[in-house]
Image (cartoon, rainbow, N blue to C red):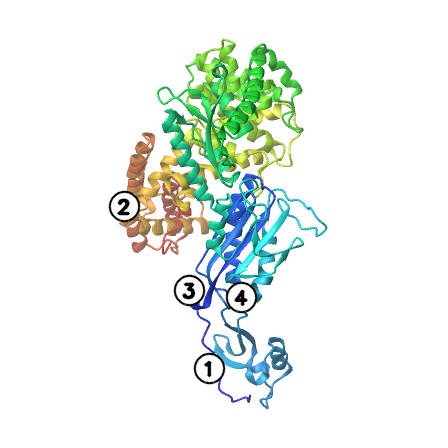
Amino acid sequence: MTKNQKPRRSAPAAKKRTRPSPASTAELLLEIGVEELPYQFIAPALAALKDSAEQLLKDQRLAFHSARTLGTPRRLTLVVEGLATQQTSVVKEAMGPSKAVAFDQAGQPTRAATGFASGQGVAVQELQIRQTPKGEYLFAVKQEEGRTTHVVLEGLLPQLIAKLSFQKSMKWNNTGVRFARPVRWLVALYGGVTLPIEFAGITAGNRTEGHRVLGSAKGMTVRDAESYLKGLERQGVIPDPQRRRHMIEEQIATLCKETGFTLNMDGDLLDQAVYTTEYPNAIIGSFKPAYLEVPQEILITSMKEHQGFFSLMHKENGKLVSHFIAVTNNRAKDMGLIREGNERVLAARLADAKFFFDEDRKSRLNDRVKKLAGVTFHQKLGTMGQKQQRVKRLAGFIASSLRPQDGDLKRACERAADLCKADLLTGVVGEFPELQGIMGGEYAKHDGESEAVSLAIGQQYLPRSIEGELPKSVAGQVLSLADRLDTVAAFFHVGLVPTGSEDPFALRRNATAIVRIILEEQLRPDIGSYIDTARDLVIGDGFKGGANPSQDGRRRMIEFLFERVRHYVRVVYALRDDVIEAVLKQSHGKSLDLVDLVQRMKALESVTAKPEFDPLIIGFKRAHRLVEKEQWDRKPVDKARFEHPTESALYEAIAEERQKMISAMTCGEYGQALDALVRLKPPIDAFFVAVMVNAEDPSIRSNRLSLLQEVDDFFNSFADFSQIVVQGG
């Protein structure tokens, strides 16, 4: 290569992966055979297996048609259809030193050129010179031929299996490999040929195991995915989770039709049935009607948590019946024995539940309250008794703020708060923690407390999930707000705040519940006063605070709630981020009425669709930047210093529209309030066309800046419009 050598034409870039032709593809089947996996692990593992396989194949330039996963408690399976038999060849390019550095005055390669060529594994004479925006540079261009898929997969599949992670893993042999449960066999076939990969000391073959009871002890040989699916079904295994789900749903529907009962649908329980069985078979059983005297929540929870049974309801009145549906992992000739076994086990569980319920009612909730002083809420935050008293005072404050004249509501809320945590000391809640609150409401009713009190106690933990049911009674809403505000304030006070994805005390869930209750029930409190009261009560208990000063702690709590508001309005109303920020930024330091803030956001989102809005914001931002940048004496606007009619016109328009905006905002008519802003566009535009703000006369310049400050203040009385993003602004 000489100094005057013309740049070589570069090789064409490698084409994107396309679907390979049938003749150049084959099917991949990978099965990981294990001891029974916990049902909660299976669906996430199958999703991760599919995602990882697709990514690894793409990274290895192995084109494929589709990938899918199958799984049961004893196997995780990957099937890749149309997998290319060879990696796609690729052209790799690397830019090296500039031509000026790569060659000396005689046109000979320098050490920079030879070193670059050596590092890239090409000869110096194969380097190309190309024109770039920075000048002429050397490029190394290499054609990398693809390897056969068999070779690639032998190294790739062990990596794929090793990438699977679980909530809990274990070691079971001297290889030190960790997996959710011991791996017992591997099947790895590509194009019908066994891939002898190794993982956890096991070498893959072409034999799999069937159902523990229904299958053959010898297992079966696999040739491809089709023989795998058909053969396993003969061995009592339905590998496809969706097919098992469909089978279970059909079987349950048939049983309900035959009996006339209605299923108490539970998505989690259905998932459990799908992933704890290889060949599902739904059966109906019964228990003694006498157990129906126990609250149905106890019976439903006992059936679900202890046995994984579905409960059944009357079609007419929706009440629980003394029957259940169990999904078994068997298909015996005489299912009566299995039914009787399930009934015996459930009878023992229900007897325990009834015993706890009967014993609990021998003591009043009120008598348990003092014992809460011995129950720790958190090591840094004292006892549950202290928390309950804070919640009582906060609930009274909230009730009074929502309905100042309703003394009955305040008394009901305070009484409910005084008893709300006592059920933590009952036998039923000790056995079924998920029934806390629900049982408190039952026991309060049994003790003769008012309906308002018992309902509030029963609803205090609603919503139990992000999208769960909200408390229906006002007292229940008050108690739920008080409990959650106290929890957030307490943990923030001692510095235990969520970081990243970590939220061990579910503070985000509590904050989301606060936001949902206020917004969906259209409550109109000043949430800032609730935060202040909650923080004062926590501080009053004398707990050692974190490192943040008092005001910073308040600000962080408000911002924490605002983050939940942001998420809510994005999801529910699909509002723009800049609109959300414009309203929230302007709200700091003011009364925090969340319903009002969302109404402003929705009105602002609506006005952004008007054609004159973007030009208006461009004019506002010009005024805002001038006011923000320039220094002036900040004197009031002096009409006597106006030199041009557009100054007077803008001043008069602001005065006129301000009154209209104030009137509209007082009535909550935010659309009309924003119309007042839109009507300012012509006088603002005319002002900037006609006058120079930075006039030579300091007094004229200062007066014009004061006029623009009036514009800035007018806009910001609704929202912080500097947050709004517009093209050209």
| Residue that mark 4 sits on | 149
| Residue that mark 3 sits on | 19
Identify the residue at horizontal 54%, vertical 69% (top origin).
148
Describe the element under mark 3 as helix, strand or loop.
loop
Q: Residues within 10 Å of mark 1 (few under 14, many from 20)?
A: few
Foreground mark, 2 or 4, reads: 4
Q: Which callout, 3 or 2, points at the residue further toward the start of the chain?
A: 3
The circle drawn on residue 9 is 1
**286 versus 328 height, above or below:** above
Q: Position of residue 722 (x, y in %)?
A: 41, 47
Total marks shown come to 4
Is 588 on the left-hand or right-hand side of 173? left
Is 397 on the left-hand or right-hand side of 426? left
| Residue that mark 2 sits on | 649
Identify the residue at horizontal 44%, vertical 15% (top origin).
409
Q: Quadrant of the N terminus?
A: bottom right
Cα distance in 3D space between marks 2 and 1: 67 Å
Q: Residues within 10 Å of mark 3 (few under 14, many from 20)?
A: some
Disc 1 residue type (three-letter): Arg
Describe the element under mark 2 as helix, strand or loop.
helix
